[in-house]
Image (cartoon, helix red, strand yellow):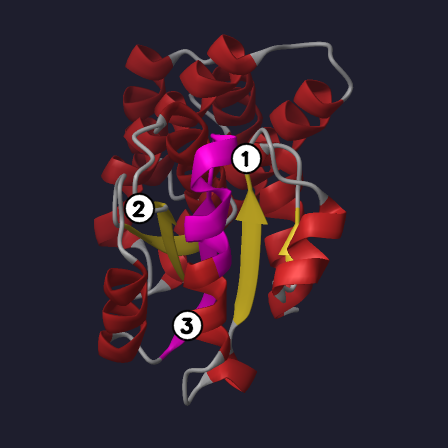
Amino acid sequence: MAGIQEIYELVEKGKAKKVAAAVQEALDAGCDPAAILNEGMISAMDEVGARFKNGEIFVPEMLVAAKAMKNGVAVLKPHLATGAAGAAGKVIIGTVAGDLHDIGKNLVAMMLESSGFEVIDLGVDVSKEKFLETYEANPDTKIICCSALLTTTMPALKQTVALLNASAGRENIKIMVGGAPISAAFAEEIGADAYTEDAATCAQKAKELVA
């Protein structure tokens, strides 16, 4: 019988093909869906994130673990109380205008989903207006994450944050920024709430910001 511990280990090891069956078995055996999500999968991703930060594993291992979790959540979703999978809140994420990098952004989105957030992924080359429009259409959003991976798109990041800072609901959201050329000092200078250097730290910080 697949228990929560087995699901934890499958996610941690990135066994994407086996997770769905293990989750179904655990459900059939009467395991609580929320416990499968929180103790089985989210806590496994927390462990993966910690190991990534310590340099014990790298991006590929983290991606396979996130994919395994995604497969497990797909089976679990119909059994969860509505919104439980996005219980931590809503996040809008995108790479700023002129920037076509998406690996880092995708990893952050997966880690945020793994931490219980509902993620609206706008993709790459996202205009500042698109970030604002999406926020206005989703006023219950808690966090907006903007990434810039090139020094040439840092001005676009600055303009995006400036537009969001001037928006009506600014006090209700936290703006997080990241990307290779970005620093905590730059984040502070442009008026963002937080900067994180990698996907694992971003997910952790996001949880702190909405707590």
For the point 46% across and 43% down, which residue is it?
147
**Which one is closest to the eye, mark 3 or mark 1?**
3
Q: What's the distance in space between the residues labelled 3 and 2, CA to CA?
A: 13 Å
From where the camera sits, is residue 38 visible? yes
> How many labels, in total?
3
The 10 Å Cα crowd at callout 2, few under 14, some 14 to 19, many 20 or more, is many
Quadrant location of the N terminus?
Answer: top left
Say which of 180 and 23 sits in front: 180
Q: What's the distance in space between the residues labelled 3 and 1, CA to CA?
A: 19 Å
Q: Is residue 118 left or right of residue 4?
A: left
Q: Which residue is disc 1 drawn over?
A: 179
Identified by mark 2, the residue type is Ala
Give residue 139's position: percent from left, percent from top.
Answer: 33, 80
Q: Which residue is disc 3 drawn over?
A: 163
Which element type, helix, strand or loop, lies under badge 2?
Answer: loop
Identified by mark 1, the residue type is Gly
Q: Tell which residue pokes out farthest to the bottom in this image.
A: 168
For residue 97, the mark is 2
Say which of 117 and 96 sits in front: 96
The 10 Å Cα crowd at callout 3, few under 14, some 14 to 19, many 20 or more, is some
For the point 25% across and 67% down, which residue is it?
134
For the point 64% across and 29% down, which residue is it?
49
**Which one is closest to the eye, mark 2 or mark 1?**
2
For residue 68, the mark is none
Q: Are marks 3 and 2 in contact (CB under 8 Å)?
A: no
Q: Are marks 2 and 1 in contact (CB under 8 Å)?
A: no
Give residue 207's position: percent from left, percent from top.
Answer: 62, 57
Confirm whether the magenta stretch covers residue 157. Answer: yes
Q: Which residues are magenta?
A: 140-158
Q: What's the distance in space between the residues labelled 2 and 1, CA to CA?
A: 14 Å
Which element type, helix, strand or loop, lies under badge 1?
Answer: loop
The first of marks 3 and 2 along the sequence is 2
